[in-house]
Image (tube, rainbow, N blue to C red):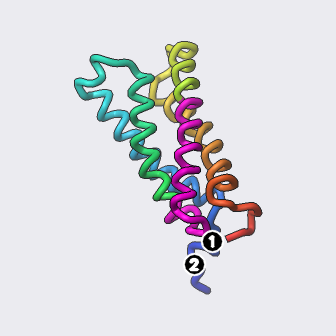
Amino acid sequence: MSNHTMSEVLPRGTLQRFGIAGGFNTFLFWIIWEALRISPVYTGTNETLLWSISWVGSSIIAHFVHRIFTFDGRRDVSKTVLGAISVYAVGMMGSTLTYDSMLDLFADVPIRLLFLINIAVWGLFTWATMRWLVFGYTRIEEE
């Protein structure tokens, strides 16, 4: 039985590798979001603002997690940070609008289920844009 490296089993830039890192990043996002929901901040604001604050906080960490684990350093960090900020800004606007819309349209659905659905959809957007636009991967087999 041969020992495979992680890059052989899960090549850099793949959706699977992004999913592992994204799971970690989503967990951080969820912790921030839940902490804000039980804090005194929640009484003076609404769910949509808490979502946005959580998105910004976890996005900063996510860039570096993806740079180290999911992708690689083929591009200078100053360029990937700028690209990631752009991707996360668009993602924050889009995910906040869809989250807010889902809160209104699906008021009877548990809020944490709406959270998971929204994160999954916007996670695919983030993976694709980070892969191709920010970190410069062009082919599936590329590493």
Tag count in the figure? 2
Position of residue 36 in the picture relative to residue 111 (left or right)? left
Q: Looking at numbered disc 2 in the image, what kind of residue is underneath it? A: Thr
Question: Is 90 or 100 nearer to us in this picture?
Answer: 90
Q: Residue furthest front?
A: 78
Q: Are marks 2 and 1 in contact (CB under 8 Å)?
A: yes
- For label 2, count other residues whose C-alpha is less than 10 Å away and answer few (under 14), some (14-19) or many (20+): few
Magenta stretch: residue 6 in it? no
- Rendered residue at 58%/56% (across/down): 18
Q: Position of residue 64 (x, y in %)?
A: 46, 58
Q: Position of residue 114 (x, y in %)?
A: 52, 27
* SS for callout 1: helix
- Rendered residue at 41%/24% (across/down): 49
Q: Position of residue 131 (x, y in %)?
A: 65, 55
The quadrant of the rendering that contains the C terminus is bottom right
Mark 2, residue position? 5
- Rendered residue at 56%/68% (across/down): 73
Q: Looking at numbered disc 1 in the image, what kind of residue is underneath it? A: Val
Magenta stretch: residue 85 in it? yes
- For label 1, count other residues whose C-alpha is less than 10 Å away and answer few (under 14), some (14-19) or many (20+): few
Q: Main secondary structure of the magenta part?
A: helix
- Rendered residue at 27%/24% (across/down): 41
Q: Position of residue 107 (x, y in %)?
A: 50, 14
Q: Residue furthest bottom?
A: 1
In 3D space, how far apart are the residues under numbered discs 2 and 1 (Cα atoms)? 7 Å
Q: Residue furthest left?
A: 40
The quadrant of the rendering that contains the N terminus is bottom right
Q: Against 81, is 122 above or below?
A: above
Q: Against 103, is 20 above or below?
A: below
Mark 1, residue position? 9
Q: Which residues are magenta?
A: 67-95
* SS for callout 2: loop
